[in-house]
Image (cartoon, rainbow, N blue to C red):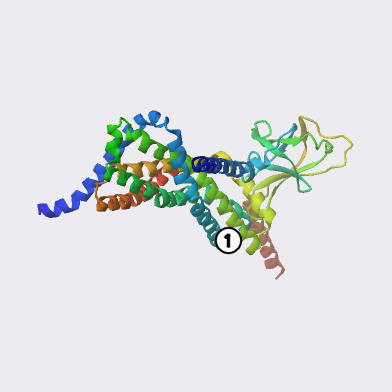
Amino acid sequence: MNPRRSYAAGTGLFILLGFLVLGYLATQTTSLVNFQSGPTYDVIAEFTNIGGLKDRAPVKMAGVRIGTVKSIGLDQKSMDARVVLAISRRYDQIPTDSFAKIMTSGLLGDQFVSISPGGSPHNLKNGSIIDNTQSALQIEDLIGKFLTSSKSSSADSGKSQ
Amino acid sequence: MKGVLARVFDPLLDGLADIGRTGWFFLALLRALPRGLTYPRELLRQIWFTGAKSLIIVMISGLFVGMVLALQLYYTLSIFGGTSALGTVIALSLYRELGPVVTALLFAGRAGTAITAEVGLMRATDQLSAMELMAVDPLAFVASPRFLAGLIAMPLLVAVFNLMGLFGGHLVGVTWLGIDNGTFWSNMTSNVSVWKDVINGEWKALAFGGLISLIAVFQGYNAPPTSEGVANATTRTVVASSIAILALDFVMTAFLM
C-alpha cells in the first residue's frame, strides 16, 4: 500500500468511526432506546390530577414496560385529565377492570402510569376506557393532610387532658 | 496624556481591527470555497492531520473528564439523595456543554496552532506568493481545505469525546461508586433526547470547528514573515480561539436552549 493511500484509508476510518460513535450516542443513550416500534392500541384513562406526567412517559405493568403515554388533554365535561395510553399489541390480554395509577420512580424520579390487572374475562381493546384510576400523589396534599391531622390530634389530646 | 490614552486604546483598536479583518478574510474564504473543493486529496490530508491525529488526546481527555464528572456529580447528587440521576446528569453535561467546549479548546491547542505555524511559515518562505505566480489560488488550495477539515473533524471528535466521557463516567459511577447499572442507563435513556441534547451539542461542535480553523488560517495567512511573527501568530490563535469559543458557547447555549 503506498503511503498516500494509507493516510487516505486512515482518514476514511476516522470519518467512519466518528459517524458510528455519533450514531451509537444518538440511538443507544437517548430516549430513542424507549421508542416503541410495532403496532399499538389506544386506551383512555381519566385522572383527577396527573401531577407531573409527561407525554411519552412509560406505561408499566408489574414493572414491565408495555407502552407509552400518547397524549394528555383536559376533558371539558368532567374537568378531568384525559390520558391516552398507547399499549403494544403484544399485550392484548389486559382485563377491562384493570386499575391505572400514576406513580413516581424513586423519590425524585419521573412519573409513569402503572396498570394493575383486574379480574374481568374481557380484555381492553382500542378505544376502551379504564374506569378505575388513581391520581398522582401530590406532596402538597400530603403535607396539607399531615398538618390538619396533626392539628386535630393535638386538639383531641387537649380535650383528653 | 495622549500617550496614556494611546497605550490603552491601541491594543483595543488592534483587537477590533483583527476581528474585522478576520470577517473580511472569511468572506474571501467563502468565495474561494467552491474552488477549494477541487482539491479533495488536500482536504483528506487535512482531515487526517487535524482530525484523526487529535483522536488520542481527545479520547484520553474525554475519559478523564467523564471520570471527574462522575465523582463530582455523585458528591453533589448525594446531598439531595438523587444519585440515581447520575447517568442523566453526566450525559447531559457532556452532550450539551463539556463535549463541544473541551474538545474545541483541545482542538485549538492541538490543530489550530499547527495550522497557524504551517501557513505562517508558508507565508514567510514565500510559498504562498509562489502559488499565486503559478496561478494557484492559495485561498482555494491552502485555506479552504484546512477550514473544511475543521468543520468536518470537530463534530466527529466531539462524538468520540462524549463516548469516552460516558465510558469514564460509567466506570467511576457504576464500577467504583456502586450505582446500579440498570438505573444509570434507564435514567439516562429516559431523560436524554436526540434533538435537544445530542444534536444541540453537534451544532456547537460545527460552529467551533469552523471558528477555530478560520482563526488559525487567518493568523497564519497574515503572520509577519519572521520567526517572531509566526510565534506571535500561533499564540494569538490560541488566545483568540479560546475566547471566541467560550463567548460563542454562551450565545449558542442561550439560543439553542
Q: Quadrant of residue B73?
A: bottom right
Helix, strand or loop at label 1? It is helix
Determine whether, in the image, residue A68 is placed left or right of residue A22: right
Determine whether, in the image, residue B223 is placed left or right of residue B165: left
Amino acid type for the residue under numbered disc 1: Tyr
Rendered residue at 32%/51% (across/down): B234
Is residue A86 visible in the rendered structure shown here? yes
Q: Which residue is mark 1?
A: B74
Estimate the x, y position of residue B256 in percent, counting from the top left.
Answer: 47, 40
Estimate the x, y position of residue B196 in percent, counting from the top left.
Answer: 54, 40
Q: Is residue B220 above or below residue A76?
A: below
Estimate the x, y position of residue B26 in percent, counting from the top left.
Answer: 33, 36
Rendered residue at 62%/56% (across/down): B170
Q: Is residue A159 above or below residue A8?
A: below
Q: Nearer the viewer, residue A76 or B195?
A: B195
Is residue B255 visible in the rendered structure shown here? no
The outermost residue toward the right is A121
Rendered residue at 33%/52% (across/down): B239
Q: Quadrant of the C terminus of chain A?
A: bottom right
The chain to which mark 1 is attached is B
Q: Nearer the viewer, residue B206 or B70?
A: B206
Rendered residue at 46%/42% (across/down): B47
Q: Quadrant of residue A134?
A: top right
